[in-house]
Image (cartoon, grey):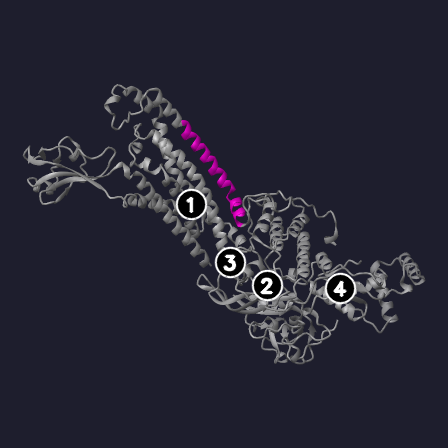
Amino acid sequence: MVEYLIDRHSGLSPYLQIVEQTKRALRLGVLLPGDQLPTAREVVEATAINPNTVLKAYRELEREGLVDSRRGVGTFVRRSLAKPQTAADSALRAELAAWMLRAREAGLEREDAAALISDALDSGFPETTTGGP
Amino acid sequence: MATDLPGRVRPTSPGPRRASVLTGAAWLSARQERTAFAVAAAVLVAVCGWLLFLGHGIDGYIAANHLQGCNIVYFPPECQGTGELVGALDMEYGPAVLATGWVLLALPPTLGLFLGAPLLAREFENGAYRLWWTQSVSRRRWLAARLGVPLAVTLVGSTILAVVSTWWVRVVEGRFAVPGYYHWFTWLTRNTVGPAVVGFCLVGVALGAAVGLIVRRTVASIVVTAVATLLLRLLVDRLRLVLETSQQAVANVRMAVVTPGDRVLSTSGHLVQNVPHEAYELANGFLTSDGLRIPQQGDWNAMVDGRPYCPSDSALCLAHQHDIVQAYVVYHPASAEWPMLWTETGICLLVTVVLVAFCFLRVGRLR
Amino acid sequence: MSHPIPTPDELPGDLPDEDEPGTASPLAADADAGAFPAGPPALEATGLGLRYRGGWALQGCDFRLPAGRICGLVGPNGAGKSTLMSLAAHLMTPDAGAVEVFGARPGAPESRRRIAFLGQDKPLFPRLTIAETLRAGYELNPGWDQQLAERIVAQGNLSMSARVGRLTGGQRTRVALALALGKRPDLLMLDEPMSDVDPVSRQELTGLLMAEAVEHGTTVLISSHVLAELDGVCDYVLVLASGRVRLAGEVDELLDSHRLVVGAHEGTGPVPSLAGHQVVELRRTGRQVTALIRPEGELGSGWDVLEPTLEDLLMAYLRSPEATALLTPSARPGADRRLPGVSA
C-alpha cells in the first residue's frame, strides 16, 4: 500500500502528484506487481481531494501500462519500475552514500549538495527535464 | 486510512430503534416539547392535587357541621343560626377558593401562551424548521407533528383537569363570599367547569401556534397570542348563550304616581315571582296594554325591590305610566348551563379547527 | 507540464478528448463507483429569480449541475449563494423561473428524500443529545445510515450523550454533517460548512465528504468564500455575483480555456496585442500588464503565458463583474441533455 501526500501549495496539480508518487513507489519497489493501490475512497478520505482527480490519475497510470483496474475489485500494479540498481543495497547507491559523506566532510550544506546533484543530473541526463512548478 | 482503522470507531450509542410509543415525526415533535410537557404535567398534578385537597377539606367541614343546604347567596330558612359556622368556613377557605378560581381561569390561556405561542415561533426563530424541512418529511407532516402531538397532550391533560375542576366547583359554588362562584353563570364558575375547560385549552394552543406561524418570533408571538386570546374569550362570552332561547316571566302591575316629581311605583302587583331558582336574568321591564316593551336596563332593582317602579330618569316609562299592565323578566333557567358549556366548547373547537386548517394552508405557501 | 493554448474549436463547448475521458468519465477503477449517473442533472435552474427587499437576491439564473460532480459555489457575500441553496432545498420558493432537483420540483417527496442541506448556521436542536439528534435523522429519513452517522460523530471524539447546545461550533458542524450524510442524499448542499472547523477537522471532514461522494456517487454543492478551500476539492464550479451566474462548468475545461498572460505595455489604453481575445481581467503595474484572458487563436509574441490556478480564475471573475458570463455546455440548462463522457 502507498499513502499519497498531497501538497496543495506545491503548484503541481494533485492529479500529477498522485501519478508521480505512484511512479516513485514503483521505482523504489514500495509497490510491486500484484499490489493493490488504495481505493479512491481511501485516497480521498485521507487527502480530502476530489475523487475524480484520483480516478484520472489511476487512468493515466493504466494508460501507461503500469496498473490494471479490475472493475469492482480495485486497481493493481502490473509492472514495477524498480531497477535492481536502485535498490537500497545496490552498489550505485552505496557509492552515492559514500559521496554524501565526503560532501559533508568537505563542509557542504544540504542545499549545496542538492545543487551539485541537480547540476550533475542535468549534464548526465540531458534529454529529460524535470517537471515542477 | 481512516476508514480502516479499527478502534477509531467507538460504538457509543445503542441502536436507533428503542422501545417508544412514538415514532417518526411525532417522536421528534414530542422530544422537542419534552420540557414543556413535563412542566405542564407537573402543574396539572399539583393543581389537581390541590383541588382534591381543598375540596375534600371543604366537603368535610360541611358534612361535619350539617351545612349541606346552606347556600350563602340564598341562605334558606333552615340555615338560620348557622351564620357563624358558615362565616368560619368562608374565613378559612374563602381566600384560597378565590385564588384557586383565578388559577383555574388562567390555566388555559397560560397553556396557549407558553406551549402554543412558542410552538412554531421558536422553530422559526432558531432555524429548527429548516432542519425539519430538509429531512425527508413534507412541510405538512412537520406541521401535523408539531401541532398534533401538543394538541393530543393538551386534550388528555385538560380532560383530567376538567373532571377534577368540575367536581371542585360544584363543592364551592355559592358557599363562599366569592361572587365569581355564586351561580352557574357567574364568571369563575362558567369558565372553570365542564368541557369548556378542554375547549379553552385546545383553542389556546391552536391560537398560539397559528400566531407563531405568522409572527415567527417567540416573544412577539406570546404578546399577540395574549391579545388574541382575550378577544377570543370576549367573543365566546358573547356567543355562549345564542343557541339557547331565553324564557320570559310576567306579573300584572298597575302603576301610579305616588310621590309627585319622584318615581312611579306600582299600586298593585309585586315582583315577578315565577322566575325559577338560579335563573340568569338577561333583561326586565314593563309591558303596556298594546304590547310595548319598556326595558329597565341598568336598574335591576326596579323589578326586585319589593314593588316594581319606574326610575325617575326613564322618560319612556313615565310617559306610559298609565298604560303599563305587566312587568316582565327575561332569563335563562339553570337548565341552560350545560348547553351553554357545550356551546362554548363547540365554538372553541370550531375555532381550533379553523386555525389548524389555516396553518396547513399557510405552511404550503410560506416562502 | 505543457499546456497548449486551445484553439477556438477546442474551447468550452467540446467534449473532453479521447485520451482523457478525464473529468467526466466513469469512476471506473473503484468498487461500486459507476458512471456519472445518466438522467436528469442534480440541479437545473432556468430563469431562476428571487426578490429580496426590493431588489433581486437572484435574477435570471440559468445553469445546470450534472449529477456526480463536486461543485464549488463561489461568490461574494450577498451574491445569492445561500438563496440558491435554499430554493433548491424548498426552504424558499422562487419569484421567477424554476429550479429542479434531479428533474423534480424541490418540494416533491422524492426531491426531499434525495437532498440534504447543511445551512450556514447549522440548525440543530440544542436540547437534544447527539444520540437523539441521530435518532431524529433515523425517524425522519427512510434511507438513514446510522453507522455512517455514528462514525462521523465518533471520529470527532464526541460523546453520544453530549448535549448539542453545549458543543463548540466545529463540533456542531460535525453533528450537522453526520445528520446530512446519514440521510444518504444524492445531492448534498453545504453552505460554508467549514467556516468554524479547525484545520485538522476540516481536512478530515472534507476527506470524509469526498469519500462518501465517491462511494455513493453523491453530487456535492459546497459554497465557500475561502477559494483555497475549494481548490483540489471541486471538479465543477459555479460563480455567482450580484445574483447572477458569472461562470459555470468543469474546472478543467474552464482552466484549459483561460490563460494568465504577463507582458509589457505603455500607457493606460487598450492593449492591441490582446485584441481579438476575450479579456476577463486586466491589471497594470507600471509597464507590466497582467491579464486573464480567454484566448481565441494564437497569442502574439511578447507574452508570458501561464495556466491559471482555480483561484486565479475565480478571483478574476469575481473582480470583473462586467466580463461576459461563461457556461460550459454541460452547465447550460435546456435542450442539450447530453452529458459528456456518459456511456449509455
Q: Would you say residue C197 is visible in this rendering? A: yes
Vertical order, B142 against C9 (above or below): above
- Badge nearest the viewer, 3 or 4: 3
As measured in the structure, the alpha-carbon distance from the residue carrying label 4 to the one carrying label 1 is 63 Å
In the picture, the quarter occupied by the N terminus of chain B is bottom right
Residue B124 placed where, x, y %?
48, 51
| Residue to which mark 1 is pinned | B205
**Spatial CA span between label 2 and label 4:** 25 Å
Label of residue C73 in the image? 2
Does residue A133 show up? no
Q: Which chain carries label 4?
A: A
Seen at 40% across and 33% down, the residue is B164
Magenta extent: B25-53
Q: Distance between the residues labelled 3 and 2?
A: 18 Å
**Residue A35, located in which quarter of the rendered image?**
bottom right
Crowdedness of circle 1 by 10 Å Cα count: few (<14), some, many (20+)?
A: many
Which residue carries the number 3 mark?
A: C91
Q: What residue type is labelled 3?
A: Leu
Image location (x, y in percent) of residue C6: 68, 77
Q: Which of C37 and C73 is in front in this view?
A: C37
Q: Nearer the viewer, residue B170 or A81?
A: B170
Residue placed under numbered mark 4 in the picture: A17
